[in-house]
Image (cartoon, grey):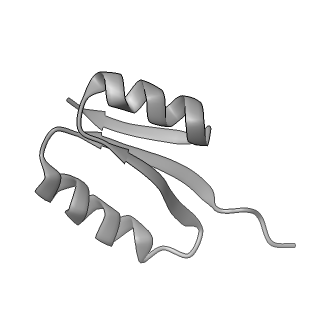
Amino acid sequence: MTHPPIRIVLADDERMVRTALRAILSAEPDLEVAGEAATGAEAVSVVREVRPDVVLMDV
């Protein structure tokens, strides 16, 4: 039985960090980067919209 991927939102004020994390996480078949945010306020908005399983945040 296959499980749906774990949906992740990346929140970091450094674009390069978000890009690197997206590249690393996207290589895993059971993970899906569902959204990104550069600020805390943007992260709240993205989370409300995409309803992820996990948020990785450093803002």
Residue 58: x percent and y percent? 23, 33
**Which one is in front, 48 or 6?**
48
Image coordinates for residue 39, horizontal then vertical, percent: 24, 30
Q: Quadrant of residue 29?
A: bottom right
For residue 52, above or below residue 5: above
Q: Quadrant of the N terminus?
A: bottom right
Q: Is residue 14 left or right of residue 57?
A: left
Question: How many numbered tags mark residues here?
Answer: 0
Q: Residue at x 34, y 30 (%)?
A: 42
Q: Residue at x 32, y 69 (%)?
A: 24
Q: Is residue 28 left or right of residue 21?
A: right
Relative to the observer, which residue lies in front, 44 or 53?
Answer: 44
Vertically, is 37 above or below 26? above
Residue at image location 46% in from the left, 28% down from the top: 45
Q: In this orientation, which residue lies closer to the viewer: 40 or 7?
A: 40
- Look at the picture and state if 53 lies above or below 47: below
